[in-house]
Amino acid sequence: MVMKLIHRESMPQKARVPLTPQDSSSARFKHLIDKELSSSDFQVNVQQAIKTSMFYVNFSIGQPPRPQFTIMDTGSSLLWIKCLPCSKDYSSDHKTYNPLLSSTYVECSCSDPFCKHAPNAQCRTSSNKCLYEQVYINGGGSKGVLAKERLTFTTPNGNTVLTSPVPFGCGHENGEQSESDFTGIMGLGAQPTSLALQLGSKFSYCIGDLANKNYGYNQLVLGEDADVLGDPTPFKIENGIYYMNLEGISVGDKQLNIEPVVFTRRGARTGVILDSGTLYTWLADRAYRELHNEVRSILDTQLQRFWFRDLLCYHGRMSEELIGFPVVTFRFSGGAELAMEANSMFYAMTEPGVYQNVFCMAVRPTTVHGGEYKDFTAIGLMAQQYYNVAYDLREKNVYLQRIDCVLLDDYSPS
């Protein structure tokens, strides 16, 4: 099942999620870490540097179908959407899903097999309902009832696909994002509640230029027709998260001096993931220092530093100053690679009248969030530009193929 991904910035202004990229990336990283810990309060206090790049998956739920715009997220495993009744008074919002009006809505009982896999599942014994609470550090979580519904997807060629009933979270308390036309999150993690498992054993997504809101070829494929291309690298699953084996990083022809143990999954707060819900790449401390120093050795002799918090920034225009900057390559076991050119490694600060001709590295140290996170790495969307990323859940491999997504039509089955 092939679906076009809708760039957040191509939506009408009122539909956009009110988050800065530092808000979403910082909070996203912290959320992944805190799945293994007792969650603590976390506040992000930074100014906007570039617009948040997220992608909506458009589908409908229930009978009659109600349109939804959910964020694709490989770091969680539950599809949840805003449902009536809401904890705040949005009953006049015709877009909010009303389960009472759907002929196919069924709530999950406490004994339903999916209940034990719902995030922070609880049983309301008085009504025999299975309750869930999906927590995100940025305040955009969801709390409600686990239920089952039929989903309707429209493929790029205009065909309509109706699924069998799948588990989802009917969210009655949905944090600060409930006023947006964004209606929920589509979790594609590895728990049994994930749509990735409900609709097959494979899924793939392809992302083009994040800066181009009119790029129309971003896509998500769920099921056996996923675009499985390129070189594989194995992953292992813990707590519903896909952990990969990153072996090294090179800048041009230079292999950085990073011991492989830095990237090894060896307990809580360690390991490497690919994450579609994070913009930046958050790099383990020892690896970040090596990359940081190498980038500085290349640019410090040519450009003036721009000092801004923990970011590595320079004065200048990316289109001029980064011509010829060497490709930065993340190498994984099995031969898979992510090769990042300048537009994947850096971004321009775009605050009018505040930051003029300044660009920063889109890789940040995990130690921003405290020393206990120094051995965790999350590779974000900027590093995945112009890549098709495919997950084979049966073989437990991720496949990486550098490609312009427009060319996927040549690979797709007829």
Image: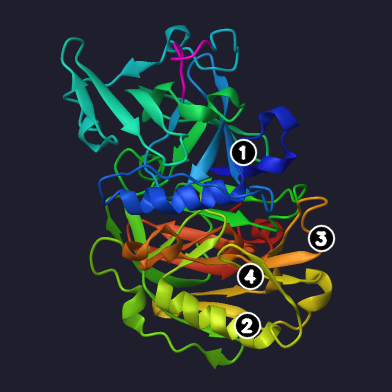
* Along the viewing direction, whichever of 157 and 17 lies nearer the viewer: 17
Quarter of the view holding residue 268? bottom left
* Along the viewing direction, whichever of 64 and 55 lies nearer the viewer: 55
- Which residue position holds label 1? 155
In the shown orientation, is residue 354 left or right of residue 15? right
- Crowd class of label 1 (few under 14; some 14 to 19; many from 20; radius 10 Å): some
In the shown orientation, is residue 307 left or right of residue 390? right
Amino acid at pointer 4: Met
Magenta stretch: dominant secondary structure: loop
Q: Residue at x 60, y 44 (%)?
A: 55
- The residue mark sitting in front, 2 or 1, is 2
Amino acid at pointer 1: Thr
Element class at badge 4: helix
- The residue mark sitting in front, 1 or 3, is 3
- 4 and 2 marks in contact (CB < 8 Å): no
- Which residue position holds label 3? 356
Q: Which residues are magenta?
A: 82-89
At which x and y percent is residue 203? Answer: 46, 51
Q: CA distance from mark 2 to mark 1?
A: 46 Å
- Which residue position holds label 2? 296
At which x and y percent is residue 42? Answer: 41, 45
Q: CA distance from mark 4 to mark 1?
A: 32 Å
Element class at badge 2: helix
* Along the viewing direction, whichever of 2 and 215 lies nearer the viewer: 215
Element class at badge 1: loop
Q: CA distance from mark 4 to mark 3?
A: 19 Å
- Which residue position holds label 4? 345
